[in-house]
Image: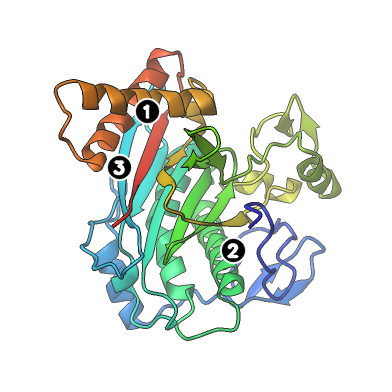
Amino acid sequence: MDLFSDLPDPDGDQNNARIAVPVTEKSQVTSTNDQVVPSSLDSTPDVATEERKRKLVTESTSNEDVSTEKKSLILKPGMYKLKGHIKEMKGERDEMQDAHVIIDDMTSELDNLPSSVSRLAYYAVFDGHGGARASKFAANKLHTHIIQKFPKTDVVSLDKEVKRCLIDSFKLTDEQFLKEASANKPNWKDGSTAICVLVVNNALYIANIGDSKALLCRFNEESKNDHFLPLSKDHNPTDYEERMRIQKAGGTVRNGRVMGILEVSRSLGDGRFKHCGITCIPDVKKCQLTEKDRFLILACDGLWKGFTIEGALEFINNKIKADEAGDKPDEDVDSKLEMACSRLAAEAIRRGSSDNVTVMLVSITHI
């Protein structure tokens, strides 16, 4: 299959940028042409959903990362085992503005699932700018909205419903944060990129906004080497489609930035730029896992200021091979990836990346 072929569009126009001020009525959103259109979003979850959220989420009162307790999962035959590993480094920044979430098993958080769905998992990295509030908010809220909106019964097109679920969850997270940001005086100016992978059975659904990346390490039979498949697309203001949307909304792109300030063309938060065409609508892609896949990498742009994509893959593989040849030959794959994750983040800083660096490696084990 074509990795970058678009999934079916959800009903309604999901391509318009939502550039309005935060919504005050939960049943409405405002489109780019200032018409009020119905929204399927429901920001009032039931009691059961609230209880699941309380079990799943730990509200952060400091700059500590948001993560969730890993749960054991009994996998069905043919299902690949996944396990996430994380390393973050502040770099030369005054504070850590990144956040992340690892949920190796999200299946138990839903009371009902379509009969075709046996396993859900979720991995996400959020790269904040202008402060840490938007990234922390997204880390706390986005996956809870996905849990609320994931289809509970059998559907005609699971691809279509998963895409709708992800887009609606991004929109609701953005609306809620902007509402909170505008209620504070002075208004919060925080924003955040997002790269998240929702795993449904053995399929990856990748949703991203901004310039954080997701890549899949896959063995190539022809070259007999590993290579990275890009699973996300950077949203830069200089890209033609992104620039046209910004200019149509009345914004400008100067020196590669929106209004000469914002470095990305899609983000959560950034309320002062929403009228300039900045949108929270993610690109959503799908990729099926195969027996040739080794691991996923999710990382903010701080990593890529110290590494090329090819360089990161070579570094990880070299560290794994060094452990195998050295004093850790019997360590399992997860232990080796955990160590490689830490070393990769540290090396990015050593190579001159002054930004926050967050690196997530997700092992793919064939059982």
Q: Total of numbered circles in the picture? A: 3
* Label 2 to label 3: alpha-carbon separation: 26 Å
Residue, disc 1: 317
Give the amino acid type for the residue marked by disc 3 in the picture: His
Q: Nearer the viewer, residue 222 or 308?
A: 222
Residue 155 in the image: above or below residue 23: below
According to the image, label 2 marks what residue?
A: 167
Classify mark 2: helix, strand or loop.
helix
Residue type indicated by callout 2: Ile
For marks 3 and 1, give the one nearer the viewer. 1
Residue behind mark 3: 85
Image vertical order of residue 264 relative to residue 68, above or below: above
Secondary structure beneath dot 3 equals: strand
Image x and y of residue 23, in percent: 61, 66
Mark 2 or 3, nearer chain start: 3
Quick one: SS at disc 1?
Answer: helix
In percent of width and height, residue 130 lies at 51, 35
Q: Is residue 185 visible?
A: no
Residue 26 percent across, percent down from the top left: 56, 75
For the residue carrying disc 2, how many other residues have a C-alpha within 10 Å: few (<14), some (14-19), or many (20+)? Answer: many
Earlier in the chain: of badge 2 and badge 1, it is 2
The span from disc 3 to disc 1 (Cα, nearest Å) is 16 Å
In the rendered structure, which disc, 3 or 1, sits on the residue that comes first in sequence? Answer: 3
Q: Residues within 10 Å of mark 3 (few under 14, many from 20)?
A: many
Image point 70% across, 76% down: which residue?
Answer: 11
